[in-house]
Image (spheres, rainbow, N blue to C red):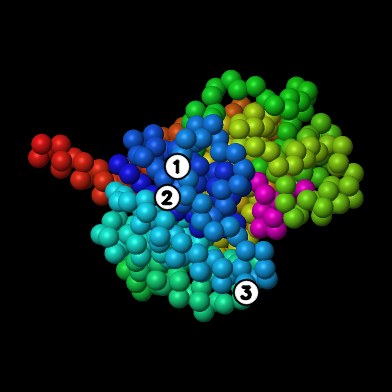
Amino acid sequence: MRVAYICADAGVPVFGRKGSSIHVQEVVRALRAHGAEVELFAARTDGEPPSDLADLRVHSLPAPSKGDIAERERAAYAANEELRQALRRAGSFDFIYERYSLWSYAGMEHARAFGTPGLLEVNAPLIEEQRKHRGLADEQQAERVAKIVFGSATTLIAVSEGVAAYLRRFPSVNGRAHVIPNGVNPARFPLGLKPALPASPASFTVGFVGTLKPWHGLADLVEAFALLHEKDGNARLLIVGDGPERESLEADLAARSLLDATVLTGAVSHELIPGLLASMDVAVAPYPDDPDFYFSPLKVYEYMAAALPVAASRIGQLEELIEHEHNGLLFPPGDVRALAEALDRLRRDRKFASRLGSLACMKVLRSHTWESVARRIIALAGVEVAMAHGEVSG
């Protein structure tokens, strides 16, 4: 089984530490575990690959342009010709799998032209996201690319129902969108893993993992932790990650005299995350209220795999993943007092917290592993059907 994986997004370093980078690595890893020979076509190949992906064949696409927004967009669009040529040189594949990016369409067009299954993974409504957070010079061209690539793909894979709803707005999608949420690698979360940052037995550690960006609700987290800390001076806040909100986050903590009760690790490699999760007593996902919430938060799946009780906003996919008071606690988005009460409840009732964590772990290991994600991808590509037919006919 020969598979081309395409990531033409200049914002996704395929061997990096971002959640999007980890997603690429885990899907590639899981496909290889299913016997696939994967070749990676990517715009950002800087950095060292993980040791188990060091032998991965990588085709480098044109490096990101350093000009203004319009110039970068034109360069990314022009890179379609080089992707097309790289795919032709590489030969035939059993299927082509691409992580949707704003300007890339040649991969799915190539698949359609050669009668190869083309699977397009869509992680976000990128046009709206780009316009809102980073700037978009040629929105009409981005819309045209979306129509081309969505229409060319054999199958579209949405990471959440929110993304699937976005895809259904395009008439060309016509029932070809399937939801496959994120997953976990169980081998990364063994029982009895020692904490990387152990605390005293009397402490209670509230943890968060992720890029420090506005849509992660960090201000609400700090305010809720302040309320908790008033009740228990031994409470500790552990924030794993870095990003544009770090300066304001530190200022907020300092204004509340909470810097001494907080550990900010900065950016860390993905290999260190399990030990840091083992250092937490509860993990949080305090997303603010957003009617267009579309995330499939990788952090929450990993919290659960680490058998942590999770306190999360009752929003989007989280409301489906977490059953309130069964395998986690949900609170209204933006309700700081409700979050603080959830944290205090878990602090006071450690047996209840432990039960939530155990049931959370059972759920993700049963239904949300990268192995199961890869199995569904292969089935949607029709490869398993073809292989089974070949065995019967042989």
User: What kind of element bears circle 2?
Assistant: strand
On the picture, is 280 further left or further right than 317? right
| Identity, as a three-letter code, of the amino acid under mark 1 | Arg
Please report whichever mark, 2 or 3, sits nearer to the chain's N-terminal start: 2
Q: Horizontal placement of 126 versus 369: left or right?
A: right
Residues under numbered marks 2 and 3 in contact, where contact means CB atoms less than 8 Å apart: no
The picture quadrant where one finds residue 131 is bottom right
How would you rate the neighbour count of disc 1 (Cα within 10 Å): few for under 14, some for 14-19, many for 20 or more?
few
Asked if residue 128 lies in the magenta stretch, the reply is no
Task: Please name the residue that numbered disc 3 is placed on.
Answer: 70
In the image: residue 361, left or right of residue 34: right
Image quarter hosting the N terminus: top left
Residue at the image point whose x is 67% and y is 49% from the top: 211
Residue at 78% across, 23% down:
200
Magenta-colored span = 210-223
Residue flagged by tag 3: what amino acid is it? Ala
Q: For the residue carrying disc 3, how many other residues have a C-alpha within 10 Å: few (<14), some (14-19), or many (20+)?
A: few
Q: CA distance from mark 2 to mark 3?
A: 27 Å
Q: Earlier in the sequence, mark 1 or mark 2?
A: 2
Q: Describe the element under mark 1 as helix, strand or loop.
A: strand
- Do the numbered discs 1 and 2 sit on residues whose CB atoms are within 8 Å? no
Query: Which residue in the rendered view is the most extreme toward the front?
Result: 89
Dot 1 corresponds to which residue? 57
* Drawn side of residue 35 relative to residue 228, left or right: left
Q: Where in the figure is residue 231, as x and y percent of width and height?
A: 81, 38
Q: Which residue is mark 2?
A: 5
Badge 2 density bin: few <14, some 14–19, many ≥20, Cα 10 Å: many
Q: Main secondary structure of the magenta part?
A: helix
For discs 3 and 1, the disc positioned in front in the rendered view: 1
Residue toward you, 102 or 205: 102
Q: CA distance from mark 3 to mark 1?
A: 32 Å
What x and y, as percent, mark residue 277? 64, 33
